Image (spheres, rainbow, N blue to C red):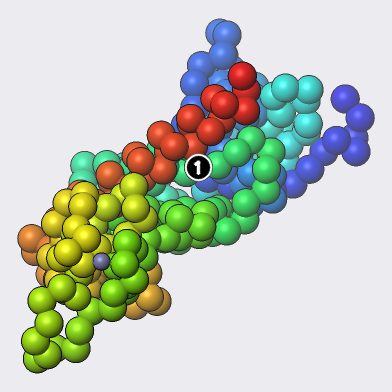
Amino acid sequence: MKTHHLYRDVGVVLRTYKLGEADRIVVLLTEGNGKVRAVAKGVRKTKSKFGARLEQMSHVRLLLYRGRELDFISQAESVEPLAPMLGDLDRASQGIAVLEAADQMGLEREPNPQLYRMVVGVLRTIAVRPSPLVVPAFYWKLLAAEGFGPELDTCVHCGEEPVPAGAHHDGAELVAFDLHEGGVLCRSCRSGGPISREALDILRDILGGRLNEALAAPESRASHEVGVLATKAMEHHLERRMRTVAIFER
Ligand SMILES: [Zn+2]
């Protein structure tokens, strides 16, 4: 292997799996090289110098060298301890949901520094300030960053805008949300499922640069609604993307 194939990057460990007797394949989301699949030699031996630094959710600075299919990890040092939150069941399940979404959204060796920054940011938030809305907000912001943000202000079917409070006009209230249509719908055009005004407000906060306000709000039926919708939206997007990939690969 030529030395010019050496490269440095930082990344978060999405998952790992065993390779042979003593090695492990580490799947990372890196800042500069997108998703990277790299071999960590000998990490399953007790004397391994960096095994513990390459656990799921570890945030590490790496020296790697490029292989034909898999890369090889030459050095790994911890950037910050994110993995300890795996000890708390609630935080662990939130963190793992983030890693799984990142794994599906990230493309191998396709740099996506924005995705990397969002993942690190949300993991830090879960570590210090867990809220039931952290993961849903991450999903929505991720979809918006990929160009699939929902329309929240006008009916996606007729373009009707909501009427100001106090006005009397039946048709223009936004009452439904349809993933296939890409956003909210008024009473006359409604399809998909109902959405409450409170849930719509939370969604607008999340996607309108008021994430802190959204996260500070107490848990409610509306925040639960936003969570359920976020999971559906993410699944919908990933399914559609898988179909597109399948078409390209035919
Ligand atoms: Zn309409």
Q: Residue at x 9, y 87 (%)?
A: 168
Instruction: Indicate whether 168 appears above or below 189.
Output: below
Q: In this view, does 91 lie to the left or right of 141?
A: left
Q: Where is residue 75 in the image (x, y as percent from the top left)?
A: 69, 38
In the image, is the residue at mark 1 within 8 Å of ligand 1 by its beta carbon? no
Is any part of residue 67 visible from this angle?
A: yes
**Could you say which is closer to the camera, residue 22 or residue 123?**
123
Reading the image, the residue beneath label 1 is 105
Q: Which residue is drawn at 62% across and 51% down?
A: 112
Ligand 1 appears in which quadrant?
A: bottom left
Instruction: Indicate whether 206 appears above or below 239.
Output: below
Is any part of residue 126 visible from this angle?
A: no
Q: Which residue is drawn at 28% across and 78% down?
A: 161
Q: Where is residue 76 in the image (x, y as percent from the top left)?
A: 63, 41
Q: Residue furthest bottom?
A: 166
Amino acid type, residue under disc 1 in the picture: Met
Q: Residue at x 34, y 47 (%)?
A: 180
Total number of numbered discs in the rendering? 1
Q: Which residue lies furthest to the top in this view?
A: 21
**Could you say which is closer to the camera, residue 130 or residue 137?**
137
Q: In this view, does 148 lie to the left or right of 24?
A: left
State which quadrant residue 225 falls in.
bottom left
Q: Where is residue 243 in the image (x, y as percent from the top left)?
A: 48, 30
Please, what secondary structure does the residue beneath circle 1 have? Answer: helix
Q: In this view, does 71 lie to the left or right of 159?
A: right
**Could you say which is closer to the camera, residue 57 or residue 140?**
140
State which quadrant residue 184 falls in.
bottom left
